[in-house]
Amino acid sequence: MTETTTALEPLVARLAETAPGLRVETGPGATGLYAYDASNYRVPPRAVVFPRSADDVVAVLRACRETGVPVTARGGGTSMAGNAVGPGVVVDFSRYMNRILDIDPLARTARVEAGVVLDALRSATALQGLTFGPDPSSHSRCTIGGMIGNDACGNRSVRHGRTSGHIEALEIVTADGVRAVAERTGLRAADPEDTDAVQRVAGLEAELRRLIDANLALLRTELGRIPRQVSGYQLHHLLPEHGFDMARALVGTEGSCAVVTAATVRLVATAQASTLLTLGYDDVVDAAEDVPEILRWNPTAVEGMDEAIVATMRARRGPDSVTGLPEGRAWLYVELDGDDQAAVDARAGELLDVLKAQGRMTGGRVVHSPAERRSLWRVREDGAGLAARLVDGGESWPGWEDAAVAPEDLAAYLRDFRKLLAAHGLTGVLYGHFGAGCVHVRIDFDLATDTGRAATRRFLSEAAALVVEHGGTLSGEHGDGRARGELLEVMYSHRMIRTFAAFKEIFDPEGLLNPGVIVAPAPLDADLALHTPSEVLPVETLFSFPHDEDGFAGAVRRCVGVGRCRSDAGGVMCPSYRATGEENDSTRGRARLLQEMVRGGTVQDGWRSTEVRDALDLCLSCKACSSDCPVGVDMATYKSEFLHQHYKGRVRPRSHYSLGWLPLTSKLVGYAARPLNALLRGPVGKLLARLGGVTTKRRIPAFASRRAVRRALRASRTGEPAKTLLFVDSFTRAFRPEVAGAASRVLADAGLPCTAEDDLCCGLTWVSTGQLSLARRIMARTVARLDNGDERPIVVAEPSCAAALKRDVPELLDTDAARRVAARVHTLTGALTDLAAPGWTPPELPDNVVLQTHCHEYATFKGRHPRDLLGRLGVAKVDEAEGCCGLAGNFGFEEQHYDTSMAVADLALKPRLDDIDPGAPAVVVADGFSCATQIDHLAGDRGIRALHLAELLDPAADRPGQPGENS
């Protein structure tokens, strides 16, 4: 193979000449991001390209061949075996080549570009009652091209099998830049008028046919033995009895033979009715024993998982995040479908009775609620991430996460596999597609030391021998990649290995396509991400990172690349990625650059790195990733720490002073609020905004006077003994003291009369701008005042300040006093949910509410959301704008972030506001000051004003019939 040290300059120059519009990135801000996928490996590329068309791909492959630079195709970057990292040029199809080109409902086919996300295809075909059958757990961000590369399967593979079974044609570019179409009956040139291409493709096919004819018996005996035999190349599809199916033969080649630019896929009808059974067991082996009987009932899915995944989900998203599971330490999900719901439910009940009679279950139930089913499926789909960082803080890794056997052999294999784990002193978290005999497991390998890596190699060699002994395969859907390529010789004969090599050589004689994968594989313990150099960034931080053994380094290592932050539906993260679509604006991208910074890899300037600073720039510090990310990445905290270190001893951006010091300046303004408000509304206000780095496209909120706060609280006093402490935060004090008064009255009405503390600060604005030394001093003062022997619950009306007291204060101060204060903190929603007097009912509420939940409340106070409280209090319809409002504290006020702020608002909040009928009674509720300010900005002169929950529930408030009358 040509050395990858070939100079990059000729390649870039050649691409500029042949594809002048092609986006090419060569700096550390790009190569650091693409050095990783979701595997254990790190291979920094020389460049990353973002094609917009097949012609761009042709130009890339021709230029790479001319300059001897390898090429790795990449979709969503969620590959767990190291399939999507490479040393040369990485081609990202997900950014631009993500168009659905055609849907034919009659033929039940769709033609899509390689970068189309599976859920996007499903959404487009749903109107025709059709879907794409294979459904990996990463369906919200994996691409069709990536599924083709790995021959992906998914949760419903017992019904729909592998991706290869749903491919009609592949549009490919060969290693020498020829466009061709791989069909069910062979290979042809994409352009029949291109004589050179026609001859080249005809020669390819002739060579392939000779190879197959010389190995008929071999292919018939070693390939296609079990349903999930993905390892190696699927050359049996080229046998005469299969019609020389070139399309299916290229599925699963992991981009090592040709680059797929588009595909024609077959669609299946969406089931009219379905139901879910959850079955509990004492052990995953007991669960596997029941699989053969379950398969007799023609299920669509039979999925298994163990207790570690469920425990981690409950710890991360709250105890109520997983409901509907029977008693047990392992579970099966069994999905049945049909044309009639009653018939499906009856069949589910019959199956449950049969399994109970078998005597292995600890319990089982039929899950009728669609919402509960969605919640349960999320636990299973987040399995890879949840298993990566468990509730006890332990880390586990892929590498042997994808073996498969025949379903009837699964229980025996699992028994022996667990004995093997025990013999090596390892622990594995088990889950997977039990109905297809495919077991995913993440294992607590020690990949950071020479001793640990040697032990891992020994284990993997023995595990490969074990699965082959059980008639199985190294890979059941993730592909071989760098993790298992070296082990193919354990599974296949030497002659088959040579046949695989010959197949690749026909397509890629110079070995430039995804080198080190399947053929001439790289050692499985080479290029491990945890094999860090001895010289790494010294990490002494102000945040304590109490949940991560290695502090900041361990915290950023939480990201294992599963890419849930790249999803555009479900949950709240990652608003900046949803707005821009750029990898460096995703939680994963930022975490990868921080990992590079810590190791001194592609990012070599440490805390002073401009690449990391720029990647963090559009992070809204919404904290949603700390809840939505399966491994609990908390990018808001990482950003605060980075900004503190980056600007230590340096002049900061102007907005860090103007907005970061807002609690102090607003307190001073409060002594002369009226004249200063008048001044700020005129030209002087715009001038001050520009000087402070604040956008002039927003109206500066009016400041409240100090007397207004005292007046609001004085009017709400009840004279009853106080059971709670109302913490009047800086935003409430400075801009909406009426909320403090309303909150005080609501608490009293709910049997929780309060006293108010209106002279303290949580330190949030200093945290979000990375001024952590100041934040600690402010927090220490606050904690000293609050930790005075008073054990009353602390209720905070502003969710972001409540979150700061709950999480930032103990993690920055790291004292018992701070932890005691944090344990007492509640949002108003939480206080009314957990502490209100039994039987309390608020005044009459509207039937419909449009709700914007603050991101910090969503992330930090799990299971205590306004949506649920409003529903319990009798609001018939809560239309929640799920996602960030876009203002996000200082972010949306900063001049350079205004456009991104509005783009984020366009994702969820603005459409909800636009749907409000001026003639219909709808009330908008937003507890966060930022959210309310953004709503006011978006509403313009439409008369829509966001109420705080306290104002909605205030027993002293008027009850208007129209939404605009509250303004």
Image (tube, rainbow, N blue to C red):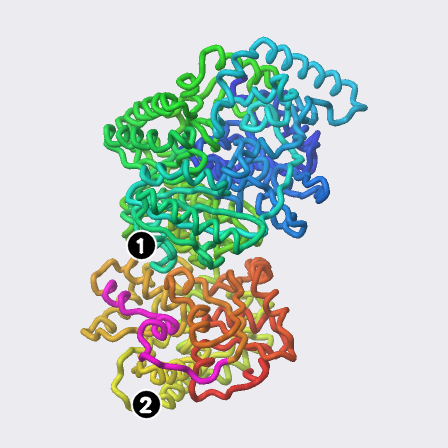
Identify the element where label 2 is drawn. loop
Identify the element where label 1 is drawn. loop
What is the quadrant of the C terminus in the image? bottom right
Q: In the image, which residues are magenta?
A: 818-845
Q: Is residue 228 magenta?
A: no
Residue 895 percent location from the top left of the image = 55, 62
Q: Residues within 10 Å of mark 2 (few under 14, many from 20)?
A: some
Could you say which quadrant of the image residue 292 lies in?
top left
Query: As drawn, is 36 to the left or to the right of 190?
Result: left
Q: Residue at x 56, y 20 (%)?
A: 236
Query: As drawn, is 903 to the left or to the right of 751?
Result: right
Which amino acid does the dot numbered 1 rest on?
Answer: Phe
Q: Is residue 830 magenta?
A: yes
Q: Residues within 10 Å of mark 1 (few under 14, many from 20)?
A: many
The disc, 1 or 2, on the residue closer to the chain's N-terminal end is 1
Could you say which quadrant of the image residue 900 lies in?
bottom right
Residue 888 percent location from the top left of the image = 48, 63
How many numbered discs?
2
Q: Nearer the viewer, mark 1 or mark 2?
A: 2
Above/below status of 777 relative to 340: below
Q: Which residue is mark 2?
A: 718
Pick the residue in front: 20 or 659. Answer: 20
Q: Give the label on residue 543, or none.
A: 1
Q: Give the label on residue 394, or none.
A: none
Q: Residue at x 69, y 33 (%)?
A: 54
Residue 117 percent location from the top left of the image = 58, 43
Query: As drawn, is 411 to the left or to the right of 885?
Result: left
Residue 539 showing in the rendered view? no
Q: Which residue in the rendered view is the most extreme toward the left? A: 789
